[in-house]
Image (cartoon, rainbow, N blue to C red):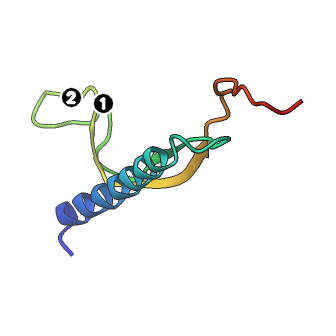
Amino acid sequence: MHPALWVSKTGLDAQQTNISTISNNLANASTVGYKKSRAVFEDLFYQNINQPGGQSSQNTELPSGLMLGAGSKVVATQKIHTPGNAQTTTNS
């Protein structure tokens, strides 16, 4: 697969997981005791094309270099444990 398409695919896969997590949060918003989740993302490896401080042409240096990323991925779905609103019941 072409590298640019691979990067796009990994981003779309990660965003699909994020949308699914948000949809699950919305579907359970009124469920008593439900704790919402959040997708946690991570960059995949970077490829160094030009090193920082390396020569770009005759007498010029690259101050920051050139790095190409390989995409992103979801590494976890994290539960958010914030206290919710107190529920008044008729129980003694």
- The residue lying at 36 percent from left, 51 percent from top is 19
Q: How busy is the neighbourhood of tag 1: few (under 14 within 10 Å), some, or many (20 plus)?
A: few
**Residue at x 50%, y 41% (from the top left corner):** 29
- Tell me the kind of residue under disc 2: Glu
User: Is the residue 14 above or below the residue 22 in the image?
Assistant: below
- Dot 1 falls on a residue whose secondary structure is loop
Q: Residues within 10 Å of mark 2 (few under 14, many from 20)?
A: some
Q: Quadrant of residue 54?
A: top left
Q: Secondary structure at mark 2?
A: loop
Marks 2 and 1: in contact by CB < 8 Å? Answer: yes
Name the outermost residue toward the bottom.
Answer: 1
Residue extending farthest to the left is 58
Query: What residue do we see at 34% from left, 61% from top?
Result: 13
Residue 70 seen by the camera: no
- Locate residue 6, reporting x and y percent: 25, 65
Q: Is residue 78 left or right of residue 27?
A: right
Number of numbered discs overlaid on the protein picture: 2
Which quarter of the figure is the C terminus placed in?
top right
Distance, label 1 to label 2, CA atoms, is: 6 Å
Residue 71 position, x and y percent, is: 33, 55
Give the left or right position of residue 92, taking residue 52 as reference.
Answer: right
Q: Dividing the image into 4 quarters, which one contains the N terminus?
A: bottom left
Amino acid, disc 1? Gly
In the rendered image, the vertical position of residue 74 relative to residue 6, given as above or below: above
Left or right: 12, with 27 as reference point: left
Residue 23, given in percent of the width and then of the height, sits at: 40, 51
Q: Which residue is mark 2?
A: 61
Q: Which residue is mark 1?
A: 53
The residue under the point 53% across, 40% down is: 30
